[in-house]
Image (spheres, rainbow, N blue to C red):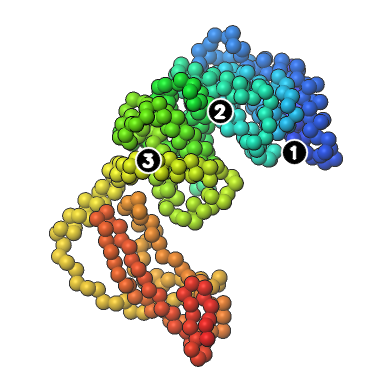
Amino acid sequence: MDDLNVNDALIHSVTNAYTCLLNGSPPSRSAAPEILQKLLVAFDAHLTLLVFTFLPGENVDEGPSGVCDTHRGRGVTLSSLLTLLEVLCASRLRCSTGVCTHSQRLVYTRARGLIKMAASSSCDYYVKRQVLLLMKRTLLQKAGEDMALGETSAAAPRDEHFAADMEALADTTLRALSADWLQFVPVETTTASSFGGSGPGAGQGEGQALKPDHVMLRAVGLVVLKSLELALQPGAGADGAVGACLGALLGFLRDRGVPLMEPSHRCCWFTLVFAEQDDDMMEAAKTLLTLYLRDNSRCPGSDPEAASGTSGTPCASGFNPHCHFLLFLRSVSFDHSTLLDFLISSETCFLEYLVRYLKHLRADSPGFSLACRKMEESDTYVRARLSCSASRADAAPAPAPAPLPVPVPVRVGEQGTTQAHPGLDRPGPSAQPTGLGSGLCLVDYSSSDDEDAGPEDMEVSQASHQYTDEGNMRSTIRLTQRRRCGPQCVTTGETGRHNV
């Protein structure tokens, strides 16, 4: 017990010291990199020996879920050790000295021990979750971002061992994946609470919807995808690896409660797993696009409906980039303002992903059309709505022209935006889109800033309606605003300025 307390104190002290130096805390802001490098060298041997104590070596031949006595009952110590390992990885990415100590490479050289810890029956669940999050951030080169250590530039110089260490980490992960490692990785079931949080599913009241821990699912998914991306380098000769690994990943997601669709179209897993976290979703989309292009390049001349280097179609393996892009658009309700936010945000890699995808779209427009048709066919809600609309259109007589609606007054909000009257015929919040082109909405134009103007009347008339075969409705609304504010006063519709 005394040794355990000493280890805990050493881990906490070193972690706090490294974190402060990485943050550049005063008064040592200018000398922080030099001091950090000296501490890394001084504690290198001690930290390496400490990590060897808790992580089994390569010569330990246990199963993927082997029990390690050093893990039992030491959840707090293991969690602190994992935090220290992430700080060490962050120091490697942020200190461009060109010198890398052995302790900064422990996540890569002891990857097998981390993988066994994530599946060990003697580790607590929160420790396994932290292991997979550490592996995810290491593969994404984002170690330390959640510790307020700042972002890491991908263009920053790396030491001479970095590329080899990343490939070794990916190779170790894929070898564990081929040995059915994912079967032993647990995923707890949670349920949403009344305050927006989540809690364990056990012991919850009846009628509450249970869902798997999506933080764990996203971590596992990105670990597998990034490992595949590193292993499937151009000309690396990893034929068949994409289909096998994605098949194992989809089986893991299905066994952990993710509601996948029919076997012929499993691309929906992309939004089911990653939709709640924007940065993870964009990383997954970019990686899946890279995997598709590299794997499909081995089959030149393949048509969109043929296999792309794997058994079955890309949709059967769940990595069709056209489906992923359409699913992403549907997840944001085809809102152009949301897409603009993604474009200008520095928190995701959406811009890089979009440029790559548009290049692929220009070269494979038939594949995009095919993906649109497949998504419409696989959407049971759309099929039901289309069949119901078609039957009603055949049975019902032609409706008589509706009279023009009576003008209704509207009020002007505090911010100067016009709010429509509740009596207007507008789709309610429960209305669902019936196709990929749905999601049209009315835009409230800003009104005049002149609060001294007289009462306003708005005359709303419906100009035209156009119905498509898919059940989409497009309407053009003409808004004519009349004001009483002096001679020849006209208000423009877009800016709300007065032209006299």
Look at 44% across and 79% down and name the residue there: 481
Is 392 placed left or right of 291 in the picture?
Answer: left
Q: Could you tell me which secondary element the residue under label 3 belongs to? A: loop
Look at 49% across and 26% down and name the residue there: 234
Residue 117 horizontal/vertical position (percent): 57, 20
Q: Quadrant of residue 472?
A: bottom left
In this view, 262 is above or below 107: below
Is 49 placed left or right of 354 in the picture?
Answer: right
Query: Mark 1, residues whose alpha carbon is within 10 Å: few (<14), some, or many (≥20)?
Result: some
In this view, 406 is above or below 85: below
For mark 1, what is the residue? 23
- Residue 213 appears in the picture as rendered: no
Q: How many marks?
A: 3
Residue at mark 2 to residue at mark 3: CA–CA distance:
35 Å
User: From this viewpoint, which residue is outermost toward the right?
Assistant: 27
Q: Earlier in the sequence, mark 3 or mark 1?
A: 1
Look at 18% across and 59% down and name the residue there: 393
For mark 2, what is the residue? 132
Residue 494 horizontal/vertical position (percent): 48, 72
- Residue 435 appears in the picture as rendered: yes
Residue at mark 2 to residue at mark 1: CA–CA distance:
24 Å
Q: Quadrant of residue 361?
A: top left
Please name the amino acid that badge 2 sits on: Leu
For mark 3, what is the residue? 364
